[in-house]
């Protein structure tokens, strides 16, 4: 028996279901801790511990938001090119926009790919 939990829902954006894989859960606090206790004290000395932690959390949130925005770019370009979008899943080190089908034209494939890698389901 293998343990392979399904990703949990974060909601919808533009009608696209957004999920986070469970591998994301330990990474988020780790990033916040690494930024708050390692990077920021070295790069921005003189702040309080609370300020370091708030900035670490904010930076971690912005990292995952940037991955989500990147995947939304794939999904919206795919829609503009006539393909359906299944969902977006955030993983430990990135994200994945699932598309419904293959682009009909090489130019469509290029437009979707130019905003980054994607998976076709």
Image (spheres, rainbow, N blue to C red):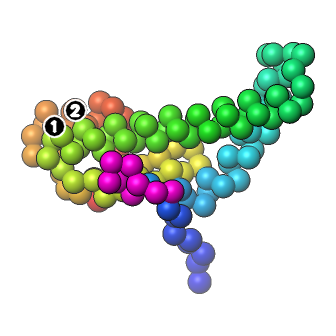
Q: Quadrant of residue 41?
A: top right
Report the disc number at residue 111.
2
The region drawn magenta spans 10-17
Residue placed most toward the observer, 1 or 88: 88
Q: CA distance from mark 2 to mark 1?
A: 5 Å
**Quadrant occupied by the N terminus:** bottom right
Report the disc number at residue 108.
1
Q: Is residue 120 visible?
A: no
How crowded pointer 1 is (Cα within 10 Å; few <14, some 14-19, many 20+) is rated as some
Q: Is residue 102 visible?
A: yes
Q: Is residue 88 above or below residue 77?
A: below
How crowded pointer 2 is (Cα within 10 Å; few <14, some 14-19, many 20+) is rated as some
Report the disc number at residue 86.
none
The outermost residue toward the bottom is: 1
Q: Position of residue 93 (x, y in %)?
A: 57, 44
Q: Position of residue 30 (x, y in %)?
A: 75, 44
Q: Position of residue 62 (x, y in %)?
A: 59, 34
**Quadrant occupied by the C terminus:** bottom left
Going 18% across and 40% down the picture, which residue do you hit?
A: 80
Q: Are marks 2 and 1 in contact (CB under 8 Å)?
A: yes
Going 39% across and 49% down the picture, which residue do you hit?
A: 13
Q: Is residue 84 above or below residue 75?
A: below
**What element does badge 1 sit on?**
helix
Q: Is residue 7 left or right of residue 46?
A: left
Q: Is residue 120 left or right of residue 43?
A: left
Say if the magenta span includes residue 1: no
Going 29% across and 30% down the picture, which residue do you hit?
A: 114
Q: Is residue 116 above or below residue 93?
A: above
| Most common SS among magenta residues | strand
């Amino acid at each position: 028996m293998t343990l392979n939990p399904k990703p949990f829902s974060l909601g919808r954006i533009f009608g696209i279901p957004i999920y986070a894989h469970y591998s994301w859960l330990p990474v988020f606090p780790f990033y916040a801790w690494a930024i708050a206790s390692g990077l920021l004290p070295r790069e921005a000395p003189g702040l309080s511990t609370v300020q370091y932690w708030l900035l670490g959390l904010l930076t971690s949130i912005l990292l995952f938001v940037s991955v989500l925005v990147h995947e939304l770019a794939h999904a919206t370009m795919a829609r503009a090119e006539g393909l359906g979008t299944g969902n977006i899943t955030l993983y430990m080190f990135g994200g994945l926009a699932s598309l419904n089908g293959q682009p009909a034209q090489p130019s469509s494939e290029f437009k979707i790919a130019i905003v980054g890698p994607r998976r076709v389901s």
